[in-house]
Amino acid sequence: MSVPRPRSRNRSFLAVTAAGTLVLAWGGTALAAQQGPTTVEPAGAAFSAELVGSAVFTAGDVTITCDVSTSAPGDGNNLIPGAPGNHNPDGAVGGPINAPDFTDCTTNVFLVSATVTVNDPVWQMTMQHGSPSVATMVVPAAGIVVNTSGLATCTATVSPDADAPIGGEWTNGDPVSSLAFDTTTPVSVEGGFGCPNTDEAGFSATYEVTNADDPAAPITVSG
């Protein structure tokens, strides 16, 4: 299967999104779409996100666990909008981020290894204040491809036909905030023996979010 070419990097900065945030929930309490005022602080700060524990992808009976995943500022991405763009009285606040990588990955299947490829290095992310507050990463269509090799050779493409909004619960911290995902997305799986027969994949992970400019000043989401 050919790997889709990355999309254009010429993306306009999303200081304010349209009303509401689409969230896909998997298990537990659903994170409902929300609308209302949002303020993200400190205005203009750069932020980093680092995985705590493991990121877990599930497709049928196959589980892929990745122990390293980070998103760091650079190329004008991972920035809180400068004032007054860091406040939206009617909805979410967001902008482009450098897509997280996923490395040190293993599977729960004997003699089967896995790699996770992020095809588009720039994603979009929005933050919406609420109960709970929600941060949503928008994975571009076919933006993540999981390949397994060994006793089972499979290719799983996340949301091959449309962008996939992946919503997680945001928790303010001091000085480290957290973002926890427990969601599902559409997936297309190709391959033969040992490959899961499913059109839905689960994703769970928790990230620590820090202020890359001033680690003592937390990134916070409020109304």
Image (tube, rainbow, N blue to C red):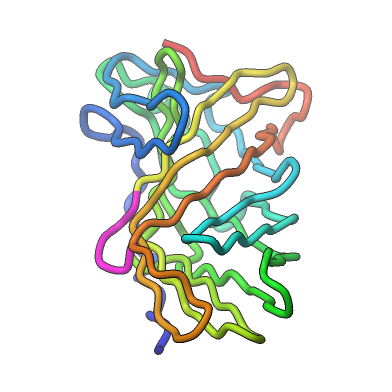
In front: 143, or 126?
143
Report the magenta stretch's main SS.
Answer: loop
Q: Is residue 32 magenta?
A: no
| Image point (51%, 34%), residue name | 80
The image shows residue 23 at horizontal and vertical percentages of: 34, 36
* Displayed quadrant of residue 6: bottom left
**Vertical placement of residue 40 versus 158, above or below:** above
| Image point (60%, 60%), residue name | 63
The image shows residue 108 at horizontal and vertical percentages of: 68, 64
In front: 9, or 22?
22
Q: Quadrant of the C terminus?
A: top left
Q: Is residue 52 left or right of residue 19?
A: right
Q: Quadrant of the N terminus?
A: bottom left
**Vertical placement of residue 24 versus 178, above or below:** below
Q: Is residue 160 magenta?
A: yes
Q: Is residue 61 left or right of residue 158?
A: right
The image shows residue 208 at horizontal and vertical percentages of: 69, 35
* Displayed quadrant of residue 175: top right
| Image point (40%, 66%), residue name | 9
Q: Residue furthest left?
A: 19
**Vertical placement of residue 39 versus 33, above or below:** above
- The magenta stretch is 159-164
The image shows residue 92 at horizontal and vertical percentages of: 34, 27
**Vertical placement of residue 72 versus 143, above or below:** above
| Image point (33%, 14%), residue name | 37
Q: How many marks?
A: 0
In front: 54, or 88?
54
